[in-house]
Image (tube, coloured by chain):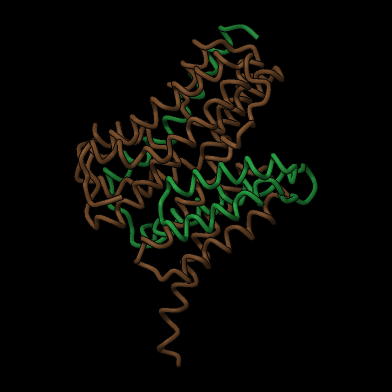
Amino acid sequence: MDIDLSAKAGLKDVMPTAFGYIGVGLAFGIVAHTSGIGPFMVLLMSLIVYAGSAQFVLTSMLLAASPVSAIVASVFLVNARMALMSMTVAPYLKKESLTQNILIGSLLTDETFALSMNKLNVTHRPLRPAWFHAANLGAYLIWAAATVAGDLVGSLIPDAKAFGLDFAVVAMFIGLLYLQMVTDRSRRFSRHLEVAGTVMLLMVILMRFMPGNTAILVATVLGCLIGMALEHLRKEAPTHD
Amino acid sequence: MTDGKLLVTILLCGLATWLLRVTPFVLVKAARLPKWLLSFLSFVPVAILAAIFAEELLVYHPGAWPTLNVENTLAALPAIVAAIVSKSLLVTVVVGVAAMAVVRLLGWG
């Protein structure tokens, strides 16, 4: 990743995440196929809902004949963390028009959010719509194509987990997390490690009481509050020495 | 399941997700964020990525403590080393996928 904020750079930057989208997208398409959802409906779902874990939740709840209201409520909860990510990116695009903001927000994902945060650390200047649109659209189209492909070949692949491709998305989050910790120089690496460690410990405790997707939201909010408290205490500390 | 119900579900879920994605952009555009909120948000990237990563390493059991996802944890170790050594997203992903293939081949999961 370099300081280039052109559309071409956006496409280039989003490419490594393509493996993750293809791995999970194929897996989702195969699940959708076995759940009796055809390629056209999978395409619509990927284009309209456009959210990995939420699409899995939606499909499994449909299969269990859950009422529409319950499905929508669950999807809302699973995706609630998106509001947190949008809120974090938005200040860096405040100077752009409302239309640009809405367009970028409409296609923001975990991955393009993390990429944009990495990019900010590298460029030290506001993000540009051209870069963001290219990264977002690249991810959007790859996701849609991968899910439809998974649905079409669903009957041919008996085991979606073959070749470890489904792990691409986990590896990608590992890479994005590490890069975020080393490139965000507003804090020392040890401070980032502290926040990450606290959040991971919180996840273990929270998942005793709630499913993972809800725990992600709660752990993130608590982790940020703890981070703020620690930073506040340390700023106060020298005066008391 | 009918395609009608599926379509209505997709549209409503899409609307809910879109509002979650877009509303913060509209709010931030309209208002000046207080300093404490900006400070809070500065922790979001590392916190949320750590939470997503932790969720992948755990298995949820309703009403009980989560257990370790051994397969994912084993494959995560080489991926972490790859991230540190290469500082490249692509290398991390390729090493992670290869590690998972090996873990499954050896039946360690």
Side of B45 where B103 appears, left or right: right
Seen from the viewer's position, the closer of residues A151 and A188 is: A151
Residue most extreme to the bottom: A241
Residue most extreme to the right: B64
Side of B50 where A100 appears, left or right: left
Residue B95 at what x, y percent from top left?
52, 47
Residue B34 at what x, y percent from top left?
33, 58
Residue shown at the point (67%, 52%) measured from the top left = A206
> Which chain is displayed in brown in the rendered image?
A
Residue shown at the point (47%, 55%) measured from the top left = B83
Task: Using the image, determine if residue B100 lies above or below residue A225.
Answer: above
Q: Quadrant of residue A102?
A: top left
Side of A207 where A181 appears, left or right: left
Side of A35 where B39 appears, left or right: left
Number of labels in the image equals 0
Q: Quadrant of residue A179?
A: bottom left
Seen from the viewer's position, the closer of residues B98 and B3 is: B98
Seen from the viewer's position, the closer of residues A217 and B51 is: B51
Residue shown at the point (62%, 6%) measured from the top left = B2
Task: Using the image, determine if residue B92 lies above or below residue B105.
Answer: below
Task: Using the image, determine if residue A210 lies above or below residue B47.
Answer: above
Residue A236 at what x, y percent from top left?
42, 81
> Which chain is displayed in green in the rendered image?
B
Residue A73 at what x, y percent from top left?
58, 30
Quarter of the image that includes the C terminus of chain A: bottom left
